[in-house]
């Protein structure tokens, strides 16, 4: 897998098969149907009847991205672009907007795309409440909306393509509980306040922690998905709580390096830094091995961008789809840190890390060999 520039700094068997995402990363990660679907205790799960959206191709599809503020979002958009380029017979044009991580800008983008007569909108919402009205308006106008990565607060969309934020939040938290033998102090280093991704992971984690009276969440702080801000936040937490911090629950891999840097700056040595959770990025895995940090990685594959295009085409073909369309993550762990709930990871961190690669390389980017985000280029439908 090629490397990423550091941009983070400057939901029957046929259904299971339909939800299966093939392994396209450079590593042998989990390739089965989503575990969150297979082990869902509900007999029936919500589906969307898309017959009213059926149209003859080719289609004009709009993608309103929250922004390109970090390397994960760049690869997700590239995945979406790549998938669109593979369907020139079905897609007449793909129009992409960049919300610059600003609610007002993204709302204006969605209004503009709606006025341009798109057949379908794909939206990754910057924050869930602020973008709800404009997405709801588009649905009321008869434009089907597929959410990807980040959803709105209401259910006014056709389908939401995502990894399971709830599963991630709960699994990270349960692992921490078991690593601490049910007793200890945790800092929750979250992502962006108001983001559905961060909020859902936080809520799920806190439900787990609440079951253990001797586990105390000392503080919840927000990194805005930035390692720089994460370092600042953790420096403040270390200054406030010192060595009483027994674990750091991180909402993604983006803040992890900053957190570890803060512990190192505070004089922590290898083997002394408390357990951390992470997702996707190479850097935290490198640091975990170098400084002997217990770490659980649960992937949140940016390949969901490409899946959103596949889902969009199914919507416009009138196919019924699950309201929550989840894809499968990989689960990786540092050796010796197995617990009752994570006894056998899909892989160990030393097996998936790119030891000599840059910190912001995505280990499960799903773009295939030879991919380089700096030079990635594809001819989109409608381009001359």
Image (cartoon, rainbow, N blue to C red):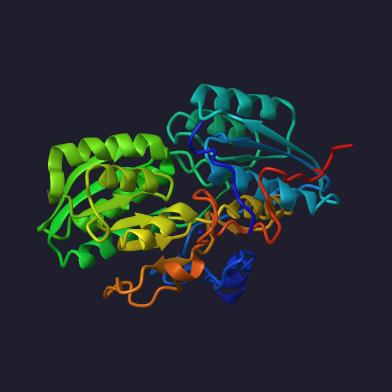
What is the residue that sits farthest to the left in this orientation? 214
- Residue 100 sits in which quadrant? top right
Q: Residue at x 38, y 41 (%)?
A: 191
At 31% from the left and 53% from the top, the residue drawn is: 204
Seen at 42% across and 59% down, the residue is 285
Q: In the image, is 141 to the left or to the right of 82?
A: left
Position of 308 compared to 128: left or right?
A: right
Position of residue 238 measured from the top left corner of the image (x, y, whole percent): 19, 41
Q: How many marks?
A: 0
Above or below, 350 relative to 362? below
Q: Position of residue 382 (x, y in %)?
A: 84, 39
Out of 14 and 181, give the one closest to the viewer. 181
Viewer-side residue, 28 vs 34: 28
Q: Residue at x 34, y 61 (%)?
A: 295
Q: Which image quarter holds the N terminus?
A: bottom right
- Farthest residue, direction right: 384
From this view, report whether residue 102 is shown above or below residue 211. above
User: Is 248 in front, or is 64?
Assistant: 248
Residue 275 at x, y percent in the picture: 27, 58
Q: Quadrant of the C terminus?
A: top right
Task: State the image coordinates of residue 239 (x, y, percent, origin top left).
Answer: 17, 37
> Which picture quadrant has residue 199?
top left
Based on the displayed image, in which of its 4 quarters is residue 177 positioned?
bottom left
Drawn side of residue 9 relative to residue 56, left or right: left
Res 118 visible:
yes
Residue 194 makes an appearance in the image: no
Above or below, 99 against 272 in this view is above
């Amino acid at each position: 897998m090629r490397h990423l520039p550091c941009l983070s700094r400057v939901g029957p068997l046929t259904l299971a098969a339909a939800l299966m995402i093939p392994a396209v990363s450079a590593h042998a990660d989990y390739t089965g149907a989503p575990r969150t679907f297979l082990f869902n205790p509900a007999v029936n799960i919500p589906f969307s009847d898309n017959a009213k959206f059926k149209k003859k191709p080719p289609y004009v599809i709009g993608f309103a991205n929250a922004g390109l503020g970090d390397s994960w979002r760049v690869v997700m958009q590239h995945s979406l672009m790549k998938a669109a380029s593979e369907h020139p017979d079905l897609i007449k044009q793909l129009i992409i907007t960049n919300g610059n991580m600003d609610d007002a800008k993204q709302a204006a983008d969605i209004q503009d795309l709606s006025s341009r007569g798109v057949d379908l909108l794909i939206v990754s919402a910057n924050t869930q409440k602020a973008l709800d009205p404009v997405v709801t308006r588009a649905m009321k106008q008869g434009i089907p909306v597929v959410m990807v990565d980040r959803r709105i607060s209401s259910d006014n969309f056709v389908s939401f393509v995502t990894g399971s934020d709830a599963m991630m939040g709960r699994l990270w938290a349960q692992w921490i509980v078991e690593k601490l033998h049910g007793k200890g102090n945790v800092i929750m280093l979250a992502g962006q306040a108001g983001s559905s991704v961060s909020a859902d992971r936080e809520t799920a984690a806190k439900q787990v922690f609440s079951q253990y009276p001797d586990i105390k969440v000392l503080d919840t702080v927000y990194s805005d998905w930035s390692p720089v801000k994460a370092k600042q936040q953790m420096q403040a937490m270390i200054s406030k709580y010192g060595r009483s911090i027994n674990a750091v629950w991180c909402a993604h891999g983006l803040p992890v390096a900053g957190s570890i840097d803060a512990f190192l700056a505070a004089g922590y040595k290898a083997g002394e830094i408390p357990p951390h959770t992470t997702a996707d990025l190479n850097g935290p895995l490198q640091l975990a091995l170098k400084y002997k940090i217990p770490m659980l990685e649960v992937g949140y594959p940016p390949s969901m961008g490409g899946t959103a295009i596949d889902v969009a085409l199914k919507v416009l073909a009138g196919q019924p789809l699950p309201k929550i369309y989840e894809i499968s993550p990989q689960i990786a762990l540092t050796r010796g840190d197995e617990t009752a709930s994570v006894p056998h990871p899909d892989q160990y961190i030393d097996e998936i890390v790119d030891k000599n690669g840059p910190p912001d390389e995505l280990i499960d980017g799903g773009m295939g060999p030879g991919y380089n985000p700096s030079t990635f280029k594809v001819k989109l439908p409608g381009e001359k």
